[in-house]
Amino acid sequence: MDYFLTEQQKTIKELARRIAEERVLPVRAELDEKEEFPWDIVKELAAADMFRVFVPEEYDGLGGGCLDLCIVTEELSRVCSGIAVTYAASALGCMTLMEYGTDEQKHKFLPDIASGKKLSAFAITEPTAGSDAANIKTTADKVEGGYLLNGTKQFITNGGEAEIYTVIALTDKTRGARGASAIIVEKDTEGFTFGKKEKKMGIRTSATRELVFRNCLVPEENLLGRAGLGFIQAMRLFDKSRPGIGAQAVGLCQGALEAATDYAEERVQFDQHLITMPVIQQMLADMSIQTEAARALVYAAARYVDSGAKDVTEPSAASKVFASDAAMKVAMDAVQICGGSGYMRDYPVEKMMRDAKILQIYEGTNQILRGAIAANLRKRKARTA
Ligand SMILES: Cc1cc2nc3c(=O)[nH]c(=O)nc-3n(C[C@H](O)[C@H](O)[C@H](O)COP(=O)(O)OP(=O)(O)OC[C@H]3O[C@@H](n4cnc5c(N)ncnc54)[C@H](O)[C@@H]3O)c2cc1C
């Protein structure tokens, strides 16, 4: 289907696909097996200006929006979802800065993120605050010279590898989530260390670590926007970033569909190629329909975000939920079509099935997001009653 991308978006898409096929494809299994952070690929992406895509032009970016970010993420995820999330998490890590930062803060941090010299990361999750993100305990006490951070963040993508972190912490712990603020913390700040690197089911090339703050003094000028608005800023951020997870899912769907189709064309049983068997054809057709429907919803949600609309919560959540459920189903069906071979690590669909699961969990689990959509339905009904 033609999604009427702009010339710049088409160029970005082609470039991302070329990097994915030429650079990522040959090493994806090895990176996954070794659980190795993909620094060489990050450098390739940086050299191709891919990190500039989501940064405004005045800070050395290309000024692309949510759809541009989705296009790159989708193409990378078609080949390796672990690399796609490494890339997209750097955008997540600086979106609050782009939205609420001062010109000075943006000039200080964004050019290095745009050039790919530095990765960024976003940290809200804690051991006691996952779905219940408002229950964070990390504190940022106002002291002379800045904020003193204490606490632990859990499961942070790009943790340990990124240089620039947006951290949500309580500047007023008496007010709970209303006392939360967004603060930039640089990697080498004293009192900021990293806990264990998680050993994951999928997206294994990406790094997921704990961030540990012990009397970590951060300059006052690293506060983003007003103190006390950090939780709202984080929720608004996810409203805008969720189509990116949807795009990761769409890319994974596309990769799994292509791998399963290739296999069905090659494999002969009962003197027939699998692709000629009606049951297999039905499965492939359903996988294709799911993939295209997910893509259409993700692109529509991304365009809606880019329009500057205020009420993006529902379409954005819907695109993430629908596309990630599609990715899980499509990846499982791809393994089924590839039979015993599909279960083996020699075939890419085994990794795709492992990679798909996280898409239903992070940036709001699909149950939590369905709950938010249902709550919106009820609000709308109450307004019209
Ligand atoms: C690989 C990975 C990378 C991540 N990257 C980041 C990152 O970069 N930055 C960051 O801040 N966080 C990150 N996270 C955290 C992620 O967003 C959380 O794991 C997610 O929000 C779920 O929280 P939880 O794991 O604590 O699960 P829980 O909240 O404990 O949920 C467990 C289960 O209970 C269900 N549940 C909980 N409450 C309800 C409810 N009220 N109604 C219905 N069901 C409910 C959930 O849907 C889920 O099925 C990452 C996580 C992983 C695994």
Image: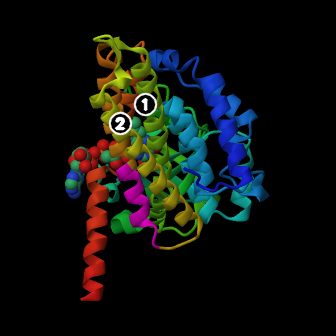
The first of marks 1 and 2 along the sequence is 1
Whether residues under marks 1 and 2 lie with C-beta atoms below 8 angstroms apart, the answer is: yes
Q: Position of residue 287 (x, y in %)?
A: 37, 39
Q: Is residue 310 left or right of residue 138?
A: right
Q: Position of residue 147 (x, y in %)?
A: 53, 56
Q: Is residue 216 magenta?
A: no
Measuring 47% from the left and 68% from the top, which residue is drawn there?
229
Residue named by callout 2: 330
In-front residue for pair 302/10: 10
Q: Position of residue 64 (x, y in %)?
A: 68, 55
The residue furthest bottom is: 385
Q: Is residue 321 magenta?
A: yes
Find residue 176 and name its label: none
Colour scheme employed for the rendering of this structure: rainbow
Q: Which SS type dominates the magenta stretch?
A: helix
Q: Few, some or many C-alpha atoms within 10 Å of disc 1 (few <14, some 14-19, many ≥20)?
A: many
Measuring 30% from the left and 64% from the top, which residue is drawn there?
372
Q: Give the Cα separation between the discs numbered 1 and 2.
A: 7 Å
State whether residue 14 is above or below residue 53.
Answer: above
User: Bounds of the magenta span?
Assistant: 311-322
In-front residue for pair 149/280: 280
- Whether residue 42 can be seen here: no
- Whether residue 297 can be seen here: yes
Task: Identify the amino acid type marked 2.
Answer: Val
Find residue 256 and name its label: 1
Task: Identify the amino acid type marked 1.
Answer: Ala
Q: Quadrant of the C terminus?
A: bottom left
Provide the secondary structure element on which disc 2 rests: helix
